[in-house]
Image (spheres, rainbow, N blue to C red):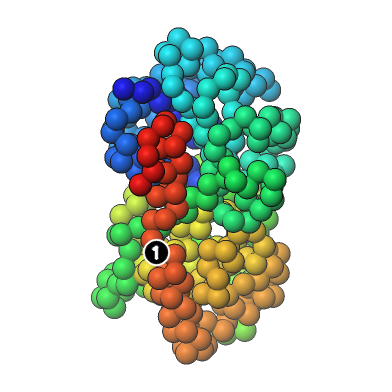
Amino acid sequence: MRKAFIDCGALVSGGLLPDTTRFILSSLEYIQQHIDEVEWHFVVSKDKPLSQEYKNLGLKNIHYLNLFPGGLQWKFWYGYQLPNLLKKQNADFLITTGGAVANIQLPQMVWLPTHILNEKAGKRLFDFYKKKWDNTLKQAHWIIVCSEKTKMQWPAWKDKMVVARPVPSETYHPLSWAEKESIKVKYAAGKEYYLIRVQTWESSLVNLLKSFSLFKKRLQSNMQLVFVKTVAGTEMDFLDKLASFKYRTDVHVLDKMEEVEYTKLLSAAYGLIDPYVQDEIGVDILNAFKAHVPVLATKEGYVEEIAGKAALYAGVDDVEQFANHMIALYKDEQLRQRQITQGETQLKNQAEPQGLTTLLNAIQQLIGRPVI
């Protein structure tokens, strides 16, 4: 039996978007379920405890490494600690989840979460991957990306890039009127609401407060705005703006909730607002389509590849356009129904697990098994 190692150091470092981490974890679970002739081993940082999401995967062979302190931590991890462990354990191949190869001559597959190559992810992390990237392109047998847009950034290496895409969760479906009313009473003072799930604290969230303010001024409606946190803490600039916000009583900031409850919250929303330029996963958007919830999103980034014509788009800092879309959805029921129908159509075009099947085929080639 061959020994496969999966480097999970990047998944517990906090450097990836929550949806990216969740998608990688679900993909690893899919891989384990479909390749049973391999002994799977997982490498995690001793400094970071395993979350419940890891425990739900039923991981058995877990190896802990101390994350080196300071700016050398990832250089030390990929350059010494991980290779040393792989040699001792006689590993046959490696899957890394942080966009870099380890310094060892071993068949390797590399997950590339695109936003780590953006300086907004953190200068030290950005500098590390920038220096490491050329070697990663050359040495990796396969590079896993989540969009065609990412793949086309490196046309010379496109033949070794595998596009893996998420599919919507089976738990999402349109809610009845009574179910929606129950959720609105619980979280939004019994009123309709636009929903924003906070993956990162950034200026676009403050701009959305401004857009919501324009919406309220022009329509004088009872519409609410609900933020759900999936990251720790709250950015101070956002709190300052919220404290002095004229419509503060119509804005709700909820702490991270169980997935079952969040499913209800999204499914009962009047609309989902997705302001993240760096999110190439877009599973929230797919789930919204499945629940018959219209989507407002940024036209930059990766969203158009995910949503096509089924979302209403605005520039990431275009306060006026986001406000106009909120108003249009509220005033024009035909527009809202048209967006819901287009969302269903978009799902039919994408709702097949080809991304994960392609990923599975790549791993089977890596370990010398025939493709399916």
**In the foreground, 231 or 108:** 108
Across and down, in percent, residue 118 comes to 69, 44
Residue found at x 30% / y 59%: 170
Compared to residue 365, the image places residue 87 above or below, namely above
Front in this rendered view, residue 167 or 335: 167
At label 1, counting other C-alpha atoms closer than 10 Å, the crowd grade (few under 14, some 14-19, many 20 or more) is: some
Q: Residue at x 55, y 71 (%)?
A: 308
Q: Who is closer to the viewer here, 214 or 97? A: 97
Residue at 40% x, 37% y is: 364
Q: Check disc 1 and give the amino acid type.
A: Ala
The foreground one among 113 and 52 is: 113
Q: Is residue 227 visible?
A: no
- The x and y percentages for residue 19 are 48, 49
Q: Position of residue 112 (x, y in %)?
A: 58, 41
Give the image location of residue 36, x and y in percent: 28, 33
Q: Is residue 256 left or right of residue 159?
A: left
Q: Is residue 18 above or below residue 72?
A: below
103 vs 133: above or below: above
Residue matched to label 1: 351
Is 225 placed left or right of 56 in the picture?
Answer: right
Displayed quadrant of residue 290: bottom left
User: Which secondary structure lies at badge 1?
Assistant: loop
Quadrant (top left, top right, bottom left, bottom right) of the N terminus: top left
Residue shown at the point (63%, 76%) measured from the top left: 323
Count of numbered tags: 1
